Image (tube, coloured by chain):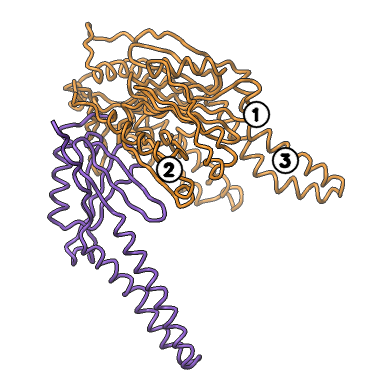
Chain colours: A orange, B purple
Amino acid sequence: MTADPAEQDGWARLHPLTPLLRGGRFALVLLAVVGQQGLRDSPGRAAAVLLAVGVPAGALAGWLSWRAMRYRVTPTELQVESGVLFRRSRRVPLARVQAVDVVRPFYARVLGLAELRLEVVGAGDAEAPLAFLPDERAGALRTQLLDLAAGRERAGDAPAPEPDRVLVVVPTGPLVWSTLLGAPLVSVVVLGPLLLGALAVGAEAAATVVVSAAPVLLGVGSLAVRRILSEYGFTVAESPDGLRLRHGLLDTRSQTIPPGRVQAIRIREPLLWRRFGWVRVEVDVAGYSGGGEDQAGGGALLPVAPRELADALVARVLGGPLPVADVAVPPAARWRAPLQHRRLRIGLDDGHVVATSGVVTTTTDIAPRAKVQSLRTTQGPYERRLGLATLHVDTAGRRLPGAVLAHRDAGEAATLLELLSRRMAPAAP
Amino acid sequence: MTPAPPPPWRRPDPALLRLRRLLVLLLVALPGAIGSLVLAVPAGGAGVLAGLAATAACSGLLLLAVERRYAAWGYLERDDDLLVRRGVLVRRTSVVPYGRMQYVDVTAGPLARRFDLAMVTLHTAAAATDASIPGLRTDEAARLRDRLAALGEARQAGV
Protein backbone atom coordinates (compact mmCIF):
# COMPACT_ATOMS: atom_id res chain seq x y z
CA MET A 1 0.00 0.00 0.00
CA THR A 2 2.84 2.36 -0.81
CA ALA A 3 0.77 4.47 -3.13
CA ASP A 4 1.17 7.41 -0.81
CA PRO A 5 4.03 9.60 -2.03
CA ALA A 6 4.43 11.00 1.49
CA GLU A 7 5.82 7.68 2.67
CA GLN A 8 8.63 7.32 0.14
CA ASP A 9 12.31 8.13 0.55
CA GLY A 10 12.43 6.73 4.04
CA TRP A 11 9.67 8.97 5.34
CA ALA A 12 7.32 7.33 7.81
CA ARG A 13 4.16 8.27 9.60
CA LEU A 14 3.09 7.93 13.19
CA HIS A 15 0.63 5.27 14.19
CA PRO A 16 -2.86 5.95 12.76
CA LEU A 17 -4.41 5.84 16.23
CA THR A 18 -2.37 8.91 17.23
CA PRO A 19 -5.12 11.50 16.71
CA LEU A 20 -7.51 9.41 18.76
CA LEU A 21 -5.07 9.23 21.67
CA ARG A 22 -4.10 12.85 21.38
CA GLY A 23 -7.67 14.05 21.05
CA GLY A 24 -8.96 11.59 23.61
CA ARG A 25 -8.17 13.75 26.60
CA PHE A 26 -9.56 16.84 24.93
CA ALA A 27 -12.74 14.96 24.02
CA LEU A 28 -13.14 13.84 27.62
CA VAL A 29 -12.91 17.41 28.85
CA LEU A 30 -15.42 18.48 26.23
CA LEU A 31 -17.77 15.68 27.23
CA ALA A 32 -17.48 16.61 30.89
CA VAL A 33 -18.30 20.24 30.19
CA VAL A 34 -21.12 19.37 27.88
CA GLY A 35 -22.47 16.77 30.27
CA GLN A 36 -22.53 19.21 33.14
CA GLN A 37 -24.24 21.85 31.04
CA GLY A 38 -26.72 19.28 29.76
CA LEU A 39 -27.65 18.23 33.28
CA ARG A 40 -28.05 21.76 34.53
CA ASP A 41 -29.96 23.32 31.65
CA SER A 42 -32.82 21.82 29.78
CA PRO A 43 -31.48 18.81 27.85
CA GLY A 44 -29.13 21.24 26.20
CA ARG A 45 -29.49 22.11 22.62
CA ALA A 46 -26.17 23.88 22.89
CA ALA A 47 -24.66 20.66 24.13
CA ALA A 48 -26.02 18.70 21.24
CA VAL A 49 -24.72 21.28 18.79
CA LEU A 50 -21.32 21.26 20.45
CA LEU A 51 -21.14 17.50 20.21
CA ALA A 52 -22.43 17.40 16.67
CA VAL A 53 -20.00 20.05 15.47
CA GLY A 54 -17.09 19.69 17.89
CA VAL A 55 -16.47 15.99 17.63
CA PRO A 56 -16.34 15.73 13.83
CA ALA A 57 -14.33 18.96 13.66
CA GLY A 58 -11.88 17.64 16.22
CA ALA A 59 -11.62 14.33 14.43
CA LEU A 60 -10.98 16.08 11.13
CA ALA A 61 -8.32 18.33 12.65
CA GLY A 62 -6.65 15.34 14.28
CA TRP A 63 -6.67 13.37 11.06
CA LEU A 64 -5.29 16.30 9.06
CA SER A 65 -2.48 16.90 11.50
CA TRP A 66 -1.67 13.19 11.55
CA ARG A 67 -1.52 13.23 7.74
CA ALA A 68 0.76 16.24 7.77
CA MET A 69 3.23 14.74 10.22
CA ARG A 70 6.02 12.51 8.99
CA TYR A 71 9.54 11.70 10.05
CA ARG A 72 12.69 10.14 8.68
CA VAL A 73 16.10 9.21 9.98
CA THR A 74 19.20 10.10 8.00
CA PRO A 75 22.74 9.18 9.09
CA THR A 76 23.15 12.54 10.82
CA GLU A 77 19.67 13.84 11.56
CA LEU A 78 16.17 13.09 12.60
CA GLN A 79 13.87 15.03 10.32
CA VAL A 80 10.32 15.78 11.31
CA GLU A 81 7.76 17.61 9.22
CA SER A 82 4.45 18.65 10.64
CA GLY A 83 1.75 21.28 10.54
CA VAL A 84 -1.31 21.73 8.37
CA LEU A 85 -1.50 25.49 7.91
CA PHE A 86 1.97 26.40 9.12
CA ARG A 87 4.37 23.76 7.86
CA ARG A 88 7.20 23.06 10.19
CA SER A 89 10.28 21.16 9.21
CA ARG A 90 12.62 20.21 11.99
CA ARG A 91 16.08 18.75 11.78
CA VAL A 92 17.53 17.35 14.96
CA PRO A 93 21.29 16.76 14.67
CA LEU A 94 21.90 13.38 16.25
CA ALA A 95 25.33 14.36 17.56
CA ARG A 96 23.58 16.70 19.99
CA VAL A 97 21.25 14.08 21.42
CA GLN A 98 21.65 13.87 25.20
CA ALA A 99 19.15 11.18 26.04
CA VAL A 100 16.37 9.18 24.44
CA ASP A 101 13.20 8.38 26.34
CA VAL A 102 10.47 5.94 25.45
CA VAL A 103 7.33 7.02 27.29
CA ARG A 104 4.21 4.89 27.45
CA PRO A 105 1.23 6.65 28.96
CA PHE A 106 -1.31 4.23 30.37
CA TYR A 107 -3.89 4.67 27.60
CA ALA A 108 -1.18 4.19 24.96
CA ARG A 109 0.15 1.08 26.68
CA VAL A 110 -3.24 -0.53 26.40
CA LEU A 111 -2.97 -0.16 22.63
CA GLY A 112 0.68 -1.20 22.48
CA LEU A 113 1.88 2.28 21.54
CA ALA A 114 4.73 4.41 22.82
CA GLU A 115 6.12 7.89 22.50
CA LEU A 116 9.75 8.51 21.62
CA ARG A 117 11.37 11.66 22.97
CA LEU A 118 14.78 13.01 22.10
CA GLU A 119 16.42 15.31 24.60
CA VAL A 120 18.71 17.81 22.93
CA VAL A 121 20.91 20.56 24.39
CA GLY A 122 19.36 23.95 24.52
CA ALA A 123 15.84 22.85 23.72
CA GLY A 124 13.22 24.16 26.08
CA ASP A 125 10.96 21.22 25.49
CA ALA A 126 11.67 17.69 24.34
CA GLU A 127 12.73 18.06 20.76
CA ALA A 128 10.36 16.49 18.28
CA PRO A 129 8.52 13.96 20.41
CA LEU A 130 7.31 11.18 18.16
CA ALA A 131 3.92 10.25 19.54
CA PHE A 132 2.73 7.64 18.99
CA LEU A 133 4.60 4.72 17.51
CA PRO A 134 4.03 0.98 17.83
CA ASP A 135 6.05 -0.41 20.74
CA GLU A 136 8.57 -2.40 18.74
CA ARG A 137 9.02 0.43 16.25
CA ALA A 138 9.83 2.83 19.12
CA GLY A 139 12.39 0.39 20.52
CA ALA A 140 14.04 -0.18 17.15
CA LEU A 141 14.09 3.54 16.40
CA ARG A 142 15.67 4.26 19.76
CA THR A 143 18.45 1.75 19.08
CA GLN A 144 18.96 3.16 15.60
CA LEU A 145 19.12 6.78 16.81
CA LEU A 146 21.50 5.96 19.65
CA ASP A 147 23.73 3.99 17.26
CA LEU A 148 23.84 6.86 14.80
CA ALA A 149 24.43 9.37 17.57
CA ALA A 150 27.36 7.33 18.85
CA GLY A 151 28.65 6.69 15.35
CA ARG A 152 28.25 2.90 15.64
CA GLU A 153 27.82 0.73 12.59
CA ARG A 154 25.56 -2.24 12.78
CA ALA A 155 25.23 -5.09 10.34
CA GLY A 156 21.82 -6.03 9.05
CA ASP A 157 18.78 -3.94 8.35
CA ALA A 158 16.82 -4.37 11.51
CA PRO A 159 19.03 -3.56 14.49
CA ALA A 160 18.45 -5.93 17.34
CA PRO A 161 17.63 -4.19 20.59
CA GLU A 162 20.65 -4.20 22.85
CA PRO A 163 20.48 -6.67 25.69
CA ASP A 164 20.93 -4.79 28.92
CA ARG A 165 22.35 -5.89 32.22
CA VAL A 166 20.21 -5.00 35.20
CA LEU A 167 22.23 -3.33 37.95
CA VAL A 168 19.58 -2.38 40.50
CA VAL A 169 15.87 -2.93 40.96
CA VAL A 170 14.28 -0.81 43.67
CA PRO A 171 11.89 -2.94 45.73
CA THR A 172 8.39 -1.59 46.28
CA GLY A 173 8.54 -1.67 50.09
CA PRO A 174 11.33 0.85 50.59
CA LEU A 175 9.94 2.98 47.76
CA VAL A 176 6.57 3.35 49.46
CA TRP A 177 7.96 3.75 52.95
CA SER A 178 10.58 6.26 51.93
CA THR A 179 7.97 8.35 50.18
CA LEU A 180 5.72 8.28 53.23
CA LEU A 181 8.67 9.20 55.46
CA GLY A 182 8.69 12.69 54.11
CA ALA A 183 6.05 15.34 53.66
CA PRO A 184 3.17 12.88 54.37
CA LEU A 185 4.57 11.93 57.79
CA VAL A 186 5.39 15.52 58.64
CA SER A 187 1.90 16.72 57.75
CA VAL A 188 0.31 13.96 59.83
CA VAL A 189 2.56 14.73 62.79
CA VAL A 190 1.75 18.41 62.56
CA LEU A 191 -1.96 18.11 61.84
CA GLY A 192 -2.73 15.16 64.14
CA PRO A 193 -2.25 16.96 67.49
CA LEU A 194 -3.93 20.01 66.00
CA LEU A 195 -6.97 17.92 65.15
CA LEU A 196 -7.00 16.25 68.59
CA GLY A 197 -6.81 19.63 70.27
CA ALA A 198 -9.63 20.94 68.13
CA LEU A 199 -11.72 17.85 68.94
CA ALA A 200 -11.26 18.60 72.60
CA VAL A 201 -12.62 22.09 71.98
CA GLY A 202 -15.61 20.90 69.99
CA ALA A 203 -16.90 19.40 66.78
CA GLU A 204 -17.07 22.76 65.06
CA ALA A 205 -13.41 23.53 65.67
CA ALA A 206 -12.47 20.06 64.44
CA ALA A 207 -14.47 20.60 61.27
CA THR A 208 -12.65 23.88 60.68
CA VAL A 209 -9.29 22.18 61.05
CA VAL A 210 -10.28 19.37 58.71
CA VAL A 211 -11.60 21.75 56.08
CA SER A 212 -8.58 24.01 56.18
CA ALA A 213 -6.12 21.13 56.23
CA ALA A 214 -7.79 19.22 53.42
CA PRO A 215 -6.07 21.03 50.51
CA VAL A 216 -2.66 20.52 52.09
CA LEU A 217 -3.29 16.85 52.75
CA LEU A 218 -4.67 16.36 49.26
CA GLY A 219 -1.66 18.04 47.73
CA VAL A 220 0.83 16.09 49.81
CA GLY A 221 -1.03 12.85 49.24
CA SER A 222 -1.37 13.22 45.50
CA LEU A 223 2.30 14.13 45.19
CA ALA A 224 3.25 11.03 47.15
CA VAL A 225 0.97 8.83 45.08
CA ARG A 226 2.27 10.30 41.84
CA ARG A 227 5.84 9.74 42.92
CA ILE A 228 5.17 6.13 43.84
CA LEU A 229 3.31 5.49 40.59
CA SER A 230 6.07 7.11 38.58
CA GLU A 231 8.99 5.44 40.34
CA TYR A 232 7.38 2.04 40.83
CA GLY A 233 9.61 -0.84 39.79
CA PHE A 234 12.56 1.46 39.21
CA THR A 235 15.19 -0.46 37.30
CA VAL A 236 18.70 0.70 36.51
CA ALA A 237 20.36 -1.24 33.74
CA GLU A 238 23.50 -0.92 31.72
CA SER A 239 23.51 -1.42 27.98
CA PRO A 240 26.06 -0.65 25.28
CA ASP A 241 23.83 2.32 24.39
CA GLY A 242 24.29 3.77 27.83
CA LEU A 243 22.52 3.80 31.12
CA ARG A 244 18.92 2.68 31.01
CA LEU A 245 16.31 3.69 33.60
CA ARG A 246 12.91 2.05 33.53
CA HIS A 247 10.13 2.96 35.89
CA GLY A 248 6.41 3.52 36.28
CA LEU A 249 3.33 1.54 37.19
CA LEU A 250 0.61 2.97 34.96
CA ASP A 251 2.59 5.28 32.70
CA THR A 252 5.97 3.74 32.09
CA ARG A 253 9.10 5.51 31.02
CA SER A 254 12.33 4.08 29.76
CA GLN A 255 15.20 6.56 29.63
CA THR A 256 18.52 5.93 27.95
CA ILE A 257 21.45 8.15 28.84
CA PRO A 258 24.43 7.55 26.54
CA PRO A 259 27.86 7.35 28.21
CA GLY A 260 29.36 10.70 29.15
CA ARG A 261 26.08 12.60 29.06
CA VAL A 262 25.66 12.95 32.81
CA GLN A 263 26.19 16.59 33.77
CA ALA A 264 25.76 16.44 37.52
CA ILE A 265 24.60 14.10 40.26
CA ARG A 266 23.06 14.84 43.64
CA ILE A 267 22.73 12.41 46.53
CA ARG A 268 20.09 13.41 49.06
CA GLU A 269 19.75 11.96 52.53
CA PRO A 270 16.70 13.36 54.33
CA LEU A 271 16.76 13.36 58.11
CA LEU A 272 13.99 10.79 58.43
CA TRP A 273 15.75 8.35 56.12
CA ARG A 274 19.01 8.44 58.01
CA ARG A 275 18.27 5.66 60.43
CA PHE A 276 17.40 3.36 57.56
CA GLY A 277 20.58 4.33 55.74
CA TRP A 278 18.63 5.33 52.64
CA VAL A 279 19.56 7.92 50.09
CA ARG A 280 18.06 9.23 46.86
CA VAL A 281 20.21 9.87 43.81
CA GLU A 282 19.24 12.46 41.20
CA VAL A 283 20.89 12.97 37.87
CA ASP A 284 20.95 15.88 35.48
CA VAL A 285 21.27 15.61 31.73
CA ALA A 286 21.43 18.65 29.48
CA GLY A 287 18.17 19.03 27.62
CA TYR A 288 15.61 17.92 30.15
CA SER A 289 13.32 20.85 30.67
CA GLY A 290 12.80 20.05 34.33
CA GLY A 291 9.13 20.98 34.44
CA GLY A 292 5.94 19.17 33.52
CA GLU A 293 6.13 15.44 33.15
CA ASP A 294 9.72 15.29 34.28
CA GLN A 295 8.77 16.67 37.63
CA ALA A 296 7.06 13.54 38.86
CA GLY A 297 10.16 11.56 37.93
CA GLY A 298 12.25 14.19 39.67
CA GLY A 299 15.28 13.17 37.67
CA ALA A 300 15.88 10.17 39.88
CA LEU A 301 18.78 7.89 39.08
CA LEU A 302 17.79 5.83 42.09
CA PRO A 303 14.68 6.82 44.09
CA VAL A 304 15.77 5.07 47.27
CA ALA A 305 18.66 2.75 48.06
CA PRO A 306 21.20 1.99 50.75
CA ARG A 307 24.12 4.38 50.79
CA GLU A 308 26.76 1.87 49.68
CA LEU A 309 24.69 0.74 46.71
CA ALA A 310 24.08 4.35 45.69
CA ASP A 311 27.75 5.23 45.96
CA ALA A 312 28.73 2.21 43.91
CA LEU A 313 26.21 3.08 41.22
CA VAL A 314 27.29 6.72 41.08
CA ALA A 315 30.94 5.69 40.80
CA ARG A 316 29.99 3.33 38.01
CA VAL A 317 27.94 5.94 36.13
CA LEU A 318 30.67 8.56 36.39
CA GLY A 319 33.36 6.04 35.54
CA GLY A 320 35.66 5.86 38.50
CA PRO A 321 35.94 6.21 42.23
CA LEU A 322 34.83 9.57 43.62
CA PRO A 323 36.85 11.80 45.88
CA VAL A 324 35.78 11.82 49.51
CA ALA A 325 34.39 15.15 50.65
CA ASP A 326 36.58 15.66 53.69
CA VAL A 327 37.91 19.20 53.46
CA ALA A 328 36.04 21.26 56.02
CA VAL A 329 35.30 24.97 55.92
CA PRO A 330 37.45 27.31 58.04
CA PRO A 331 36.25 27.93 61.63
CA ALA A 332 35.05 31.40 60.67
CA ALA A 333 32.31 29.80 58.57
CA ARG A 334 30.37 28.91 61.70
CA TRP A 335 29.40 32.57 61.99
CA ARG A 336 28.06 32.61 58.45
CA ALA A 337 26.37 29.18 58.47
CA PRO A 338 25.91 28.26 62.13
CA LEU A 339 23.66 25.26 61.46
CA GLN A 340 25.33 23.58 58.56
CA HIS A 341 28.98 24.54 58.78
CA ARG A 342 29.92 21.03 59.89
CA ARG A 343 28.27 19.63 56.78
CA LEU A 344 30.03 21.97 54.39
CA ARG A 345 32.81 19.81 53.04
CA ILE A 346 34.40 19.45 49.66
CA GLY A 347 36.48 16.88 47.87
CA LEU A 348 38.39 17.17 44.64
CA ASP A 349 40.35 14.92 42.35
CA ASP A 350 41.32 14.91 38.70
CA GLY A 351 37.87 13.88 37.59
CA HIS A 352 35.26 15.31 39.90
CA VAL A 353 34.28 17.99 42.37
CA VAL A 354 32.20 16.90 45.35
CA ALA A 355 30.48 19.23 47.82
CA THR A 356 28.22 18.38 50.73
CA SER A 357 25.77 20.70 52.46
CA GLY A 358 22.39 20.79 54.12
CA VAL A 359 20.90 20.93 57.58
CA VAL A 360 17.85 18.67 57.53
CA THR A 361 18.64 16.90 54.29
CA THR A 362 22.29 16.11 53.72
CA THR A 363 23.03 16.85 50.11
CA THR A 364 26.07 15.71 48.17
CA ASP A 365 26.58 17.37 44.80
CA ILE A 366 28.96 15.86 42.30
CA ALA A 367 30.12 17.62 39.14
CA PRO A 368 32.46 15.95 36.64
CA ARG A 369 35.22 18.47 35.98
CA ALA A 370 35.10 17.85 32.26
CA LYS A 371 31.45 18.95 32.28
CA VAL A 372 31.87 22.27 34.07
CA GLN A 373 30.44 25.12 32.01
CA SER A 374 31.60 28.07 34.06
CA LEU A 375 32.92 28.97 37.48
CA ARG A 376 31.82 31.84 39.68
CA THR A 377 32.96 33.14 43.02
CA THR A 378 30.66 35.33 45.05
CA GLN A 379 31.53 37.15 48.22
CA GLY A 380 28.85 38.95 50.20
CA PRO A 381 29.69 41.64 52.75
CA TYR A 382 29.41 39.29 55.72
CA GLU A 383 31.54 36.67 54.01
CA ARG A 384 34.14 39.34 53.23
CA ARG A 385 34.27 40.37 56.87
CA LEU A 386 34.94 36.73 57.81
CA GLY A 387 37.43 36.17 55.00
CA LEU A 388 35.16 33.70 53.19
CA ALA A 389 33.97 33.27 49.62
CA THR A 390 31.64 30.89 47.82
CA LEU A 391 32.60 29.07 44.63
CA HIS A 392 29.88 27.97 42.22
CA VAL A 393 30.70 25.18 39.80
CA ASP A 394 28.07 25.53 37.06
CA THR A 395 27.01 22.55 35.00
CA ALA A 396 24.57 22.22 32.13
CA GLY A 397 21.06 20.99 32.78
CA ARG A 398 18.30 22.64 34.71
CA ARG A 399 17.48 20.26 37.51
CA LEU A 400 20.63 20.51 39.55
CA PRO A 401 22.79 23.55 40.25
CA GLY A 402 26.12 21.81 39.79
CA ALA A 403 28.26 22.02 42.91
CA VAL A 404 28.28 24.96 45.28
CA LEU A 405 31.40 25.18 47.41
CA ALA A 406 29.94 27.43 50.08
CA HIS A 407 31.85 29.61 52.52
CA ARG A 408 35.38 28.53 51.74
CA ASP A 409 38.39 30.49 52.86
CA ALA A 410 38.74 33.39 50.39
CA GLY A 411 42.29 32.42 49.44
CA GLU A 412 41.29 28.78 49.01
CA ALA A 413 38.36 29.82 46.80
CA ALA A 414 40.68 31.87 44.57
CA THR A 415 43.11 28.94 44.30
CA LEU A 416 40.28 26.54 43.50
CA LEU A 417 38.95 28.92 40.84
CA GLU A 418 42.35 28.92 39.18
CA LEU A 419 42.82 25.16 39.56
CA LEU A 420 39.39 24.21 38.27
CA SER A 421 39.46 26.63 35.36
CA ARG A 422 42.65 25.03 34.10
CA ARG A 423 41.07 21.61 33.88
CA MET A 424 37.81 22.93 32.51
CA ALA A 425 38.77 23.55 28.91
CA PRO A 426 40.19 20.38 27.43
CA ALA A 427 42.11 20.57 24.18
CA ALA A 428 39.90 20.58 21.11
CA PRO A 429 38.78 17.04 20.21
CA MET B 1 62.15 31.80 29.80
CA THR B 2 60.55 34.57 31.79
CA PRO B 3 56.82 34.38 32.20
CA ALA B 4 54.94 37.11 30.40
CA PRO B 5 53.42 39.70 32.73
CA PRO B 6 49.73 39.04 33.30
CA PRO B 7 47.58 41.07 30.94
CA PRO B 8 45.77 43.92 32.69
CA TRP B 9 42.09 43.86 33.48
CA ARG B 10 40.08 45.89 31.04
CA ARG B 11 37.29 48.18 32.15
CA PRO B 12 34.03 49.30 30.64
CA ASP B 13 34.22 52.61 28.82
CA PRO B 14 34.02 55.78 30.98
CA ALA B 15 30.94 56.67 28.94
CA LEU B 16 29.13 54.03 31.00
CA LEU B 17 29.83 56.05 34.13
CA ARG B 18 28.50 59.19 32.43
CA LEU B 19 25.40 57.31 31.33
CA ARG B 20 24.72 55.97 34.81
CA ARG B 21 25.24 59.41 36.34
CA LEU B 22 22.86 60.91 33.83
CA LEU B 23 20.30 58.26 34.75
CA VAL B 24 20.60 59.17 38.45
CA LEU B 25 20.07 62.82 37.61
CA LEU B 26 17.13 62.10 35.32
CA LEU B 27 15.37 59.54 37.48
CA VAL B 28 16.10 60.79 41.00
CA ALA B 29 17.47 64.33 41.17
CA LEU B 30 15.11 65.90 38.66
CA PRO B 31 11.86 64.33 39.94
CA GLY B 32 13.02 65.05 43.49
CA ALA B 33 13.60 68.70 42.76
CA ILE B 34 10.27 69.08 41.00
CA GLY B 35 8.55 67.24 43.83
CA SER B 36 10.13 69.58 46.37
CA LEU B 37 8.86 72.62 44.51
CA VAL B 38 5.35 71.14 44.34
CA LEU B 39 5.64 70.52 48.07
CA ALA B 40 5.97 74.30 48.51
CA VAL B 41 2.23 74.63 47.93
CA PRO B 42 1.08 72.86 51.13
CA ALA B 43 4.24 73.02 53.25
CA GLY B 44 5.87 76.36 52.47
CA GLY B 45 9.57 77.22 52.36
CA ALA B 46 10.69 74.73 55.01
CA GLY B 47 9.16 71.88 53.00
CA VAL B 48 11.03 72.93 49.90
CA LEU B 49 14.32 73.02 51.76
CA ALA B 50 13.73 69.61 53.36
CA GLY B 51 12.74 68.12 50.01
CA LEU B 52 15.75 69.53 48.25
CA ALA B 53 18.06 68.34 51.01
CA ALA B 54 16.65 64.81 50.85
CA THR B 55 16.94 64.78 47.07
CA ALA B 56 20.52 65.99 47.21
CA ALA B 57 21.43 63.36 49.81
CA CYS B 58 19.82 60.53 47.81
CA SER B 59 21.40 61.64 44.57
CA GLY B 60 24.79 61.99 46.21
CA LEU B 61 24.65 58.49 47.66
CA LEU B 62 23.48 57.04 44.36
CA LEU B 63 26.22 58.84 42.46
CA LEU B 64 28.75 57.38 44.85
CA ALA B 65 27.28 53.91 44.44
CA VAL B 66 27.26 54.27 40.66
CA GLU B 67 30.89 55.26 40.73
CA ARG B 68 31.94 52.35 42.91
CA ARG B 69 29.92 49.90 40.85
CA TYR B 70 31.57 51.20 37.73
CA ALA B 71 35.00 50.84 39.28
CA ALA B 72 34.27 47.22 40.23
CA TRP B 73 33.61 46.08 36.66
CA GLY B 74 36.43 44.42 34.84
CA TYR B 75 37.14 41.70 32.32
CA LEU B 76 40.23 39.82 31.34
CA GLU B 77 40.73 37.81 28.17
CA ARG B 78 43.07 34.96 28.98
CA ASP B 79 44.36 32.27 26.67
CA ASP B 80 41.62 29.75 27.42
CA ASP B 81 38.92 31.64 29.22
CA LEU B 82 37.30 34.97 29.91
CA LEU B 83 37.17 36.41 33.42
CA VAL B 84 34.51 38.92 34.41
CA ARG B 85 34.36 40.57 37.81
CA ARG B 86 31.80 42.93 39.21
CA GLY B 87 29.88 43.99 42.28
CA VAL B 88 30.58 46.17 45.27
CA LEU B 89 28.50 44.74 48.08
CA VAL B 90 28.54 41.21 46.70
CA ARG B 91 31.71 40.70 44.72
CA ARG B 92 31.48 38.25 41.86
CA THR B 93 34.03 36.74 39.55
CA SER B 94 33.03 34.50 36.66
CA VAL B 95 35.26 32.31 34.56
CA VAL B 96 33.94 31.07 31.22
CA PRO B 97 36.18 28.90 29.02
CA TYR B 98 35.91 29.86 25.37
CA GLY B 99 35.15 26.26 24.46
CA ARG B 100 32.02 26.27 26.62
CA MET B 101 30.31 29.23 25.03
CA GLN B 102 27.13 28.42 23.20
CA TYR B 103 26.56 31.92 21.85
CA VAL B 104 27.39 35.56 22.47
CA ASP B 105 24.85 38.39 22.60
CA VAL B 106 25.49 42.05 21.99
CA THR B 107 22.65 44.25 23.22
CA ALA B 108 22.24 48.01 23.36
CA GLY B 109 19.28 50.01 24.61
CA PRO B 110 18.27 53.36 23.12
CA LEU B 111 20.12 55.41 25.74
CA ALA B 112 23.22 53.22 25.58
CA ARG B 113 23.22 53.61 21.80
CA ARG B 114 23.34 57.41 22.16
CA PHE B 115 26.48 56.91 24.22
CA ASP B 116 27.83 54.46 21.65
CA LEU B 117 27.73 51.66 24.23
CA ALA B 118 26.73 48.02 24.10
CA MET B 119 26.63 45.04 26.43
CA VAL B 120 28.23 41.69 25.64
CA THR B 121 26.65 38.62 27.27
CA LEU B 122 28.10 35.12 27.20
CA HIS B 123 25.86 32.10 27.29
CA THR B 124 26.90 28.56 28.11
CA ALA B 125 24.84 25.41 28.44
CA ALA B 126 24.51 26.17 32.15
CA ALA B 127 21.67 28.52 32.99
CA ALA B 128 23.57 29.88 35.99
CA THR B 129 26.37 31.39 33.94
CA ASP B 130 26.09 35.16 34.38
CA ALA B 131 29.02 36.60 32.51
CA SER B 132 28.06 39.87 30.89
CA ILE B 133 30.07 43.02 30.32
CA PRO B 134 28.17 46.30 30.02
CA GLY B 135 29.40 49.62 28.73
CA LEU B 136 31.69 48.59 25.91
CA ARG B 137 32.23 50.95 22.96
CA THR B 138 30.31 49.54 20.01
CA ASP B 139 33.48 48.70 18.12
CA GLU B 140 35.09 47.09 21.19
CA ALA B 141 31.89 45.08 21.74
CA ALA B 142 31.97 43.91 18.13
CA ARG B 143 35.67 43.03 18.42
CA LEU B 144 35.07 41.08 21.63
CA ARG B 145 32.08 39.30 20.16
CA ASP B 146 33.94 38.24 17.05
CA ARG B 147 36.97 37.15 19.02
CA LEU B 148 34.86 35.16 21.48
CA ALA B 149 32.91 33.56 18.67
CA ALA B 150 36.07 32.61 16.81
CA LEU B 151 37.75 31.23 19.92
CA GLY B 152 34.57 29.43 20.90
CA GLU B 153 34.38 27.77 17.52
CA ALA B 154 38.04 26.75 17.61
CA ARG B 155 37.76 25.18 21.04
CA GLN B 156 34.20 23.91 21.06
CA ALA B 157 34.10 20.97 23.43
CA GLY B 158 30.46 19.97 23.13
CA VAL B 159 28.24 19.28 26.09
Answer whether labels 1 and 2 touch (C-beta < 8 Å): no
Quadrant where the image shows the C terminus of chain A: top left
Where A161 falls versus A343 (above or below)?
Answer: above
Relative placement, left or right, of A70 versus B143 is right
**Residue at the spot 72% in from the left edge and 36% down from the top edge:** A188
Of the numbered discs 1 and 2, the one sitting upstream in the chain is 1
Q: Estimate the x, y position of residue A65 in percent, counting from the top left.
A: 30, 36
Q: Which of A300 and B112 is in front in this view?
A: B112
In the picture of the structure, the residue carrying the numbered disc 3 is: A190
Identity of the amino acid at label 3? Val
Q: Which residue lies furthest to the front in this view?
A: B2
Q: Chain letter of disc 3?
A: A
Q: Earlier in the sequence, mark 1 or mark 3?
A: 3
Would you say the residues marked 1 and 3 are in contact, meaning their CB atoms lie under 8 Å apart? Answer: no
Do the residues at discs 3 and 2 belong to one chain?
A: yes
Residue A374, position in %: x, y? 32, 37
Taking the spot 56% from the left edge, 44% from the top edge, the residue there is: A335
Q: In the image shown, does A419 or A109 lie closer to the viewer? A: A419
Label 1 crowd bin: few (<14), some (14–19), many (20+), radius 10 Å: some
Residue B136 in sight from this viewpoint: yes
| Residue A272 disc label | 1
* Residue at 33% over, 61% down: B68
* Pointer 2 chain: A
Find the distance from the CA under tag 3 to the CA under tag 2: 38 Å
Disc number for residue A389: 2
